[in-house]
Amino acid sequence: MKEKVEAILDEQVRPYLRSHGGDVRIRELRDGVLYVELLGQCSHCPSNTITTQSVIQEAVCQAIPDVTQVVLEDTVSEELLDMARKVLNHEL
């Protein structure tokens, strides 16, 4: 099912997000819930929750009824945290 979701994202969602300098990445698909991360300009946009619901969830859930919800994971990656620790500890 993940391949179907990627296809919908490629065809219907990513062109819109890329026109705004952003993108989307699947974090996990579990029990009918798709967890995504917004990238680029979309990641910290004040409208990212609306984009997730009105653009991503609408497209994916309409095309793939087994997906019932899309959840935005707005977290800091472990890589970024490691880099910040190194900078703060003067290791970089």
Image (tube, grey):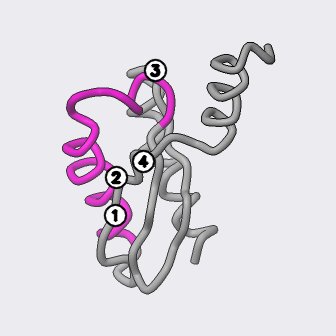
How far is disc 3 from disc 4 in space, using C-alphas? 16 Å
4 and 73: which is toward the camera: 73
Residue 56 pos. (x, y %) = 34, 52
Mark toward the viewer: 4 or 1: 1
Mark 2, residue position = 56
Which of the two discs, 3 and 1, labels the residue nearer the N terminus? Answer: 3
Q: Which quadrant of the figure has residue 20?
A: top left
Q: How many labels does the image show?
A: 4
Mark 4, residue position = 12
Which of the two discs, 2 and 3, labels the residue nearer the N terminus? Answer: 3
Relative horizontal placement of residue 10, taking residue 88 as reference (left or right)? left
Disc 1 is placed on an element classified as strand
Residue 82 pos. (x, y %) = 69, 35
Disc 2 is placed on an element classified as helix
The amino acid beneath tag 2 is Ile
How far is disc 2 from disc 3 in space, using C-alphas? 16 Å
How far is disc 2 from disc 4 in space, using C-alphas? 9 Å
71 and 11: which is toward the camera: 71
Q: Residue at x 22, y 29 (%)?
A: 46
Which of the two discs, 4 and 1, labels the residue nearer the N terminus? Answer: 4
Q: Which residues, given as a range, are shown in magenta? A: 39-63
The amino acid beneath tag 1 is Val
Callouts 3 and 1 close, C-beta under 8 Å: no
Mark 3, residue position = 21
Mark 1, residue position = 70
Callouts 2 and 4 close, C-beta under 8 Å: no
Disc 3 is placed on an element classified as loop
